[in-house]
Image (cartoon, helix red, strand yellow):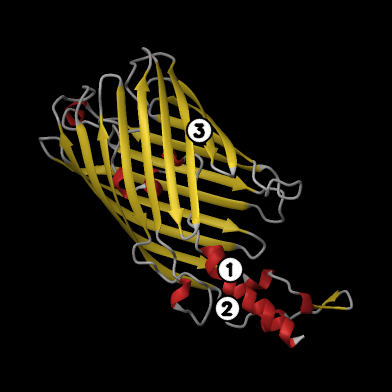
Amino acid sequence: MKNARLSIAAALVLSAPVVFAQDIHFTQFDMQPLVVNPAFTGMFDGQVRANAIYRNQWGSVTVPYVTYGASVDLPLIIERNGDYLAAGLQLYNDQAGDGNLQNFTGMASLAYHKYFGGGGYGAPGGSDLAVGLQGGYAQKSIDLSRLYFGDEWLNGNFVQGQSQEYHLGLGNSINYYLVNAGVSFSHGGNKVSYTIGLAANNLNQPNDAIEKQQSSNNTLAMRYTGELGINWIAGDRFSIRPAVLFQSQATANEIIVGSEFHYEISGNPGYENFSPAVYIGGWYRTGDAVMMTAGVEFKGFRVGLGYDYNISTLNTASNGNGGYELALRYIIPNPIKFANKRTIPCSRF
């Protein structure tokens, strides 16, 4: 029995870095731009941008995996030549499994945008080079009292109070700091605009394993992200917006590729987020899922829905087919005198 107890405890300790070492991701990644790249802070047409998202996956397991995210960002200092400094705040909480594994993270970001090219608000042309830095605090925790082990059962009956024997080397939570950085470049044209970016998360590689005796092998691996988004105006009111997101962390790699198809119902075409519009998108996460997104835009609001249909070996009757997301964004519009001082070549993310 003693060997069994030690084996279970060791398995939990050794698996902690694996279970906890993967960062969150969203299907509607453009609705959480500060998660993708800190250089996207302040990259929008407006005074203030607020985003919120809810994700629920593996709903058929005992305790579904649920993730919440929220962010707000805004330009702080705007120069006459169009350069500006922006700031933002990103919060998210991830909860998973019977043990109530939780990851709460709060990040503050700054980004400096250097504008190249002429033209005022809404004018074609021009480019934006941005550099962003992010820093924050994270807490990961587990409720060990909600986990059950084989030796806690005697002749088919639960023996209360035995679970402490399995907690060898484990704690209930760990706190640490994170540092992220990124760079992006955007260019706007008459018909085609694009944004490309590179980011590196967890630059300080903190120790994030929930165990009392920690080692250098339990550090949170750096996550590298590359993204490309295009906005192609194919008609007076119709645009096609393909995007690619690549992420790599430790031994895990992920690629999301697809496109959004956007149609403005009425109003001022090109005045993004404020003219009434509808959109639908199709996406593929390599080796994992096919995804659909759809939503509406009106008066600065964007409401989006996303659904993942899992196509990997995890798609079983017991696990369910995937997950869904609900996302909301609101942008406070610019007064004219403010808007003439800043141009966003492409705000795909």
Q: Quadrant of the C terminus?
A: top left
Identified at 55% across, 77% down, the residue is 171
The location of residue 245, given as percent across then percent down, is 43, 42
User: Element at badge 2?
Assistant: loop
Q: Viewed as shown, does residue 27 lie left or right of 145?
A: left
Q: Amino acid at mark 2?
A: Leu
Give the residue type that dot 3 points to: Gly
Q: Residue furthest left?
A: 80
Residue 79 is tagged as: none
Residue designated by label 2: 170
x and y, in percent, of residue 165 in the image: 68, 84
Q: CA distance from mark 3 to mark 2?
A: 40 Å
Q: Which residue is mark 1?
A: 142
Viewer can see residue 349: no
Q: Where residue 286 sits in the image (x, y, percent)?
A: 54, 42
Q: CA gap, disc 1 to disc 3?
A: 31 Å
For mark 1, does the 10 Å Cα neighbourhood hold few (<14), some (14 to 19), or many (20 or more) residues?
many
> Quick one: 144 or 200, which is closer to the camera?
200
Discs 1, 2 touching: Cβ within 8 Å: yes
Name the disc covering residue 304, or none: 3
- The total of numbered circles placed on residues is 3
Q: Amino acid at mark 1?
A: Ile
